[in-house]
């Protein structure tokens, strides 16, 4: 389980999705494709390698891929000793490659834009100072994400009933963020407050983030969790066993529509039918006020093979097409609350995230 990082992880736990190792100038990532069978960390030295790791889902989850991209651009400046103009060109090219890896999660573009602004400020400095500035910015993105998770966790936990069974979908935990988690940050905070919560984790076909990742990380922290297949949640709503739903998000539109892992919309419909609060926890970097509604959020299409196979096993005969949208849109009218580090938005009663605009 050892990550052999040369310093304490910024994640605040002894395991993490993504960190920077200043001793070797490498980005270190836990290979989430292998969990829970194997806990293995990989090391990356170039922005192209980091882009490959994001594309291949070594690291996933909207905030975590933004942090990875930030560190990727810090790596670029570590190895780039050209003049200011060439540095900015190289930074722009690497940023575009990173940004194309996953289209739905806006945290990626947000982090790249922030690193580009920093690049503009440090471009004229000597290469080493330039690198220090870029690394400090990437670390700030990482630290702020962990702080944001803790803050939204506190805000969300206040709404969680004592002894609640909490349903979550996909993985919006420490593995999907700088540490602590968004939706699982709410769970962790409620657990820390002694509310005696339990978690029902949707397995989250086809990539199984719920079964493989959410269950693993809650188990690490001793938080009670049970895994269900995605088609079981209706049954548990009907039996009155679920008191609260919290999920993460990849992008929140100006009208409070929420993009999240495919299957989230179905959960929201069920929660609303059964009058169970359906809530979302996400950092402000997930809010995209440039996008007026969910209809304008690009939905990533992933490969047929992720639907047609589980591991080496073929589920769908070769030649039969499959569909694989990786995300869906939950309309604002189904969302009771969005917890951010800036405060809470209540979309169902018509609130929009711009009420929290700084
Ligand atoms: O395809 P993934 O695993 O990157 O999708 C992740 C999700 O949909 C998460 O719920 C979302 O990114 C929020 S993570 C805090």
Image: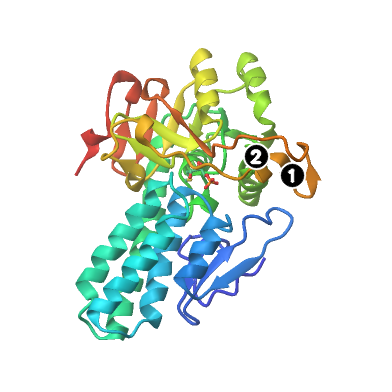
Q: Is residue 106 above or below residue 232?
A: below
Q: Residue 334 shows which numbered tag?
A: none
Residue 212, position as x, y percentages in the image: 67, 46
Residue 204 figure quarter:
top right
Residue 148, position as x, y percentages in the image: 37, 49
> Looking at the rendering, in which quadrant would you find the N terminus?
bottom right
Q: Earlier in the sequence, mark 2 or mark 1?
A: 2
Q: Is residue 176 above or below residue 324?
A: below
Horizontal side, residue 49 vs residue 320: left or right: left
Residue 353, position as x, y percentages in the image: 27, 34
Residue occupying the point 53% across, 34% down:
195
In-front residue for pair 70/142: 70
Separation of marks 2 and 1 at Cα, in angstroms: 8 Å
Q: Is residue 246 above or below residue 94?
A: above
Q: Are marks 2 and 1 in contact (CB under 8 Å)?
A: yes
| Mark 1 Cβ and ligand 1 under 8 Å apart | no
| Label 2 element class | loop
Horizontal side, residue 51 vs residue 140: left or right: right
Residue occupying the point 58% across, 23% down:
242
Q: Residue 310 shows which numbered tag?
A: 1
Q: Which residue is mark 2?
A: 206
Residue placed farthest to the right in the image?
Answer: 313
| Mark 2 Cβ and ligand 1 under 8 Å apart | no
Residue occupying the point 25% across, 86% down:
126
């Amino acid at each position: 389980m050892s990550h052999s990082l040369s310093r304490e992880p910024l994640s605040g736990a002894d395991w993490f999705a993504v960190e920077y190792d200043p001793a070797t100038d490498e980005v270190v990532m836990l290979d989430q494709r292998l969990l829970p069978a194997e806990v293995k960390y990989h090391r990356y030295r170039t922005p192209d390698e980091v882009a490959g790791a994001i594309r291949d889902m070594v690291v996933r989850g909207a905030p975590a891929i933004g942090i990875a991209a930030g560190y990727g651009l810090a790596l670029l400046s570590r190895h780039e000793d050209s003049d200011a103009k060439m540095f900015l060109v190289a930074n722009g090219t690497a940023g575009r490659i990173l940004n194309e890896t996953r289209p739905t999660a806006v945290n990626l573009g947000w982090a790249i834009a922030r690193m580009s602004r920093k690049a503009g400020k440090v471009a004229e400095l000597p290469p080493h100072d330039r690198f220090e500035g870029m690394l400090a910015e990437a670390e700030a993105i990482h630290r702020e994400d962990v702080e944001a998770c803790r803050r939204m966790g506190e805000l969300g936990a206040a709404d969680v009933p004592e002894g609640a069974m909490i349903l979550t979908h996909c993985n919006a935990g420490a593995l999907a963020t700088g540490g602590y988690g968004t939706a699982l940050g709410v769970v962790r905070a409620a657990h820390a407050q002694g509310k005696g919560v339990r978690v029902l984790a949707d397995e989250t076909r086809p990539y199984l983030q719920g079964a493989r990742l959410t269950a693993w990380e809650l188990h690490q922290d001793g938080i009670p969790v049970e895994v269900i297949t995605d088609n079981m949640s209706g049954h548990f709503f009907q039996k009155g066993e679920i008191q609260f739903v919290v999920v993460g998000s990849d992008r929140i539109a100006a009208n409070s529509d929420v993009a999240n892992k495919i299957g989230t919309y179905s959960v929201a419909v069920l929660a609303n039918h059964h009058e169970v609060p359906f809530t979302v926890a996400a950092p402000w970097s997930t809010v995209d006020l440039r996008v007026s509604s969910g209809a304008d959020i690009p939905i990533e299409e992933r490969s047929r093979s992720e639907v047609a196979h589980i591991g080496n096993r073929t589920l769908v005969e070769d030649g039969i097409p499959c569909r694989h949208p990786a995300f869906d849109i939950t309309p604002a009218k189904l969302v009771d609350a969005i917890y951010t580090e800036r405060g809470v938005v209540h979309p169902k009663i018509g609130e929009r995230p711009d009420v929290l605009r700084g």
